[in-house]
Image (cartoon, rainbow, N blue to C red):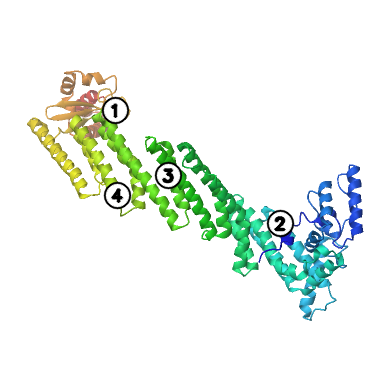
Amino acid sequence: MEVPAWLQVATDKDLYRHNAFRISGLAVTATPREVRRRVSEARAAEALGAEHTAGVTAPGSRWLPLKPPADHAAVREALRRLEDPVRRVVDEFFWFWPLEESDGAGLMKARQAWEGLAKQRTRAGAERSPDDDARSIAVHNLAVVYHADAVEAKGSIGASGRRMLWQRAYRHWRMVLDDAGCWRWLDERIRALGDPRLRTVSGDAFRDALPTVLLELHAGITVDAARRQGGEKAARGHVSLMREFMADEGVLDAVLRRATAPTVAAIRHRNEAAAGPDDEPAALERSAASLLAETKPDLQVLRAVLGAEHPVVSGAADAVASAVNGCAVACANSLARNGSATRDPSVIRATAHLRTARWLAGSTHVRTMVEENLVVLLSNDVLLACAEAARRTEPSPWQGDEEAFRLLVGTEAGLRELRELRPDDPETDRIHDGVAMTACRLLTRYFNDTQDIEGALDGYRRALPVAVSGESRAAIQKNIDTLTREQATAVITALSDQPAAAARPAAPRIRLGSADRCYRCNRRVLPSVAPVLIPAGEMLFEVTSCIPCRHLFTEVGSSASLLDSHRADVRPAGRRSRVAGRALLVSAVAALLVACLVAGLGTGLGQALGAGAVLLLGCLLWPVLVTARRRRW
């Protein structure tokens, strides 16, 4: 059901902020005399330069005051709207009705009074009396205050708080719809105004249109929420709340379609304003880019409000995809007619726009159309890359390996995309073979010019997986086999030309001294200093040397003489331990002789033994002292 024209003003999301009774401070039952008096007060306040209109305000304006307060112009406009009886009835319905139990109280106490009246009849379970309007007014006022809270809620309340406000508002509006006393009260107000312009306005008409009015208002808030950054989730939450209130999917769908109609119209206008085939290629590419950028938020709004699978969303997306496709194809065709290269930056960007259009397309036939044009542009790009590589190597075949590598790497993404778009198309196989055989020709010219087997083989092996047909793969594999045989022949020839001695095993290395001290002067040597290698016959001595002593080992003839002078030091690894053992034995014998000498010191035998001990000690210690001096221990 559509909202009647006289009730359209109630679908504005600023319904309560623009309410004439809220702005003017008058009660909904104000007489024409009271309205004229408030007009006079407003004029006097404006003439005196007062910031706001003075005067007594009704309870409703105190319960929900405007922030910031209305200025004189807004008050004048509100009072003027009260002269329209239809607009006045709408504002009366969406504002607080007078009730003796709450008129003199604050908003909190007024709510408590209304809640008590609303529950009283429910608990009693008795039939409602036609003269009992208190409960009906209380239910209506609760619906107004809760609805105003939900409509004017700040974004900081969170999803759960927002959901609670709307559920509470819809629950009380449902109570209003079910309460016949509310609509009798409204009919009485229409009769009290007694204006002939109210002939089409009635409580029944209002009651029939109220659900749609509430949904239309909520749908406008939903669209605004979807336009905010990251508002898709909030918009879907609003739609869920509306669906809880309205079980009829047809009514809800019609409301959401009307709410998103301006967005759809904006998308259509942008599509119609896109560049045409007669424009310059750069202008066509820019038009496609701007069309995608400008319609992206609109399409996000439609998806959030209507759902991604909705026909309206699919139609709008198809329209954008078709317009972008037209701009991209016209750009490529224009450059082709002018003789420009397909790899022009404008065409490369147009190809990227086609990828986005393919993702946007909602229907199969539009997506297929975009894919076909995308395949053509990708194929042309790959084939031209092959032609450019061949042209660049024409004067310099020695660069064939670099060009082949650049061609294979540069076309890899395009070939992969072609395979995804047309996996079983023979044309896709032909494009793959073209790239592989172009690289093969470049490598063949490179090898003929440089005789570089390693570089050519590496390129052939890279090109082989790209080829698809058996003929292309056989040709590349034949080149690989030929170069492999030539490589093996070259290695055998090089080995046969070497002397027999070269095939002998490497000479064994023997380390002299420790790895961290100089062999000659015993200074500490850093690990970063390389040892000196001294050949001696079939052996190779590895000697740690400090910088000052290194020349003694590296000079011609010096190393051999140094080894000759230290020949006794080239011993097995356990020699030093045996010398140390001998010294320990000598020390023990010497200690024993000294003890004997002390025991027989006073006799002639003791003197003879002392002399013999000294002689024996000298004989035993002499080799040890000579070795220690030679090795600088």
Residue 427 badge: 4
**Cα separation between marks 1 and 2:** 94 Å
Q: Within the image, what quadrant is residue 232 found in?
A: bottom right
Q: Which quadrant of the rendered structure holds the C terminus?
A: top left
Question: Where does label 3 land, which residue?
Answer: 329
Q: Is residue 496 above or below residue 424?
A: above
Which numbered disc flags the more N-terminal residue, 3 or 2?
Answer: 2
Position in image of residue 459 (x %, y %): 24, 39
Who's the residue at 16% across and 20% down the image?
561
Q: Amino acid at mark 4?
A: Glu
**Cα separation between marks 4 and 1:** 73 Å
Q: Nearer the viewer, mark 1 or mark 2?
A: 2
Q: Nearer the viewer, mark 4 or mark 1?
A: 4
**Cα separation between marks 3 and 2:** 43 Å
Position in image of residue 75 (x %, y %): 83, 50
Q: Which quadrant of the rendered structure holds the N terminus?
A: bottom right
Question: Where does label 2 land, which residue?
Answer: 12
